[in-house]
Amino acid sequence: MGTRAALFIPVENNHYARIYCHLDGYPSNMLPALAEHDARDILAAGDLRAITVEDGPERLDNPRQPDIVTTTELPSWADHGYILTPAGWEHRANRHQSHFA
């Protein structure tokens, strides 16, 4: 299913790497998969086709490197957003809240 997600990984000085994930961006898939795999591996993959617990990050055929952004506001294309915090990954659905507190 084409449920798109934006992943935010802190990089430095209140900047975030924002990664696009094309498929299966719903929380029941993403939260276990994100918890299972190292954020550095996810970041190194760049834009993703999908990520699963079993297979980890699957790169797009022509992945872009992550955008470096200063806000965690969800882009209009994202159905869901995930941000890595010291406590783990947090989820926001774009239809309910457009950015992380």
Image (cartoon, rainbow, N blue to C red):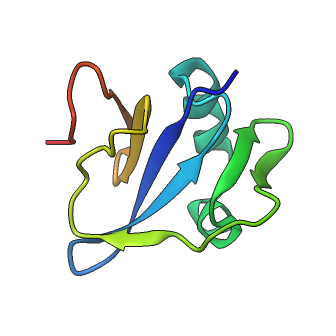
For residue 80, above or below residue 95: below
Residue 56: x, y in percent? Answer: 78, 47
Quadrant of res 11: bottom left
Q: Quadrant of the C terminus?
A: top left
Q: Residue at image x 73%, y 46%? A: 49
| Picture layout, residue 61 above or below residue 23 | below
x and y percent of residue 66 in the render? 51, 69
Q: Residue furthest toward the bottom?
A: 13
Q: Position of residue 28 (x, y in %)?
A: 58, 18
Residue 89 in view in this figure: no
Task: Specify the quadrant that holds the N terminus.
Answer: top right
* Along the line of sight, the residue nearer the viewer: 80 or 87: 80
The image quarter in which residue 62 lies: bottom right
Q: Say whether residue 68 is left or right of residue 19.
A: left
- Which is more toward the observer, 100 or 4? 4
Q: Is residue 92 left or right of residue 23?
A: left
Q: Name the residue furthest left.
A: 101
On the image, the x and y values in percent for residue 97 come to 20, 27
At x 85%, y 36%, the residue is 54
Number of labels in the image equals 0
Q: Say whether residue 22 is visible.
A: yes
Which residue does the image show at 55% across and 31% down from the upper left?
31
